[in-house]
Amino acid sequence: MIRHTLLFTGYELRKLLANPIWPLFGILQPVLYLVMFAPLLSSLTPGGGTADALRMFTPAAMMMIALFGSFYSGFGLIADLRSGSLERHAVSPAWRPALVLGRMARDMITLVAQAVLVLGVALAMGVRIGPVELLLMLALMAATGLFASGVSQGLALTVRDENGMSQTVNLFMLPVILLAGLMIPISYAPPWMRAVAPFNPFYHAVEAGRALFAGQLSSGSIPIAFAVFAALATLATLWSVRSLRRIAG
């Protein structure tokens, strides 16, 4: 089981490295937000400085990588489904769930690598974070990416059409971004949005990320975020594996 998952993870990583343009675009977008958008938040932060704005916006930019990088990864699965390569792998002696788990592991590894690069830019701009907080932040990103990737793989295997999947992802992306407080903290939102935001799991991830960057290890938002995404990542993984079994038989 583990050996087959590692084999497919390596296979997917080699495919990714053969065409690295999409991971590079995934890095450029949050970097551009850091450089061009974070300074606009200076007047909204308590300290009023660019460093304070970056401390608030950097965890949001890292979660943005998890959102945009993982939610769209299922398109590759649809392409493999159309070309027949998924069926060829499914009839091999390999453990079938490894077909999906390998892709999800690839997405997690890519996300963490992208996050380290974006964090390097943020550190160069003046952001500071402790080693424990950094490790927890990367672990939270990995859990967030595992959930988003599982949803994307499961959705791809259910919809099996690029247009349908694109419409579905785009429909949910805007409210997810706004209610997570990615661009502007949800504390600046009207009361009804503050009441709805806790029902969005990414809100908890962003709040926990901001607590980690502020050095508030005792914040209750951190265990809540890990508990939420451990449960959601498990459910998303089970959904994607069951969707694959329905197709592969």
Image: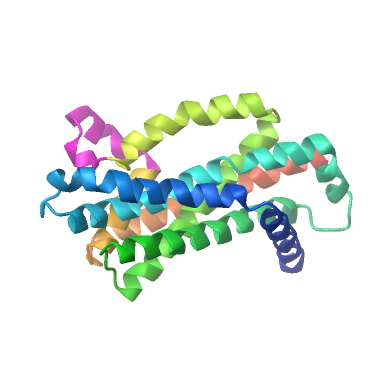
Can I make out residue 246 in this image?
no
Scheme of image coloration: rainbow
**Depicted 164 relative to depicted 80: above or below:** above
Q: In the rendered view, does 186 fall on the left or right side of 142?
A: left
The residue under the point 71% across, 41% down is 77
**Between residues 21 and 88, which one lies in front from this camera angle?**
21
Please check the rendered image and state whether residue 178 is part of the magenta-colored stretch, yes or no: no
Point out residue 31 in the picture as x, y percentages from the top left corner: 40, 51
Please check the rendered image and state whether residue 186 is part of the magenta-colored stretch, yes or no: yes
Quadrant in the picture for residue 11: bottom right
Magenta highlight range: 184-201
Q: In the rendered view, does 108 fall on the left or right side of 177?
A: right
Quadrant in the picture for residue 37: top left
Q: Quadrant of the N terminus?
A: bottom right
The residue under the point 57% across, 40% down is 72
Point out residue 90 in the picture as x, y percentages from the top left corner: 84, 48
Q: In the rendered view, does 92 fall on the left or right side of 223?
A: right
Point out residue 60 in the picture as x, y percentages from the top left corner: 34, 49
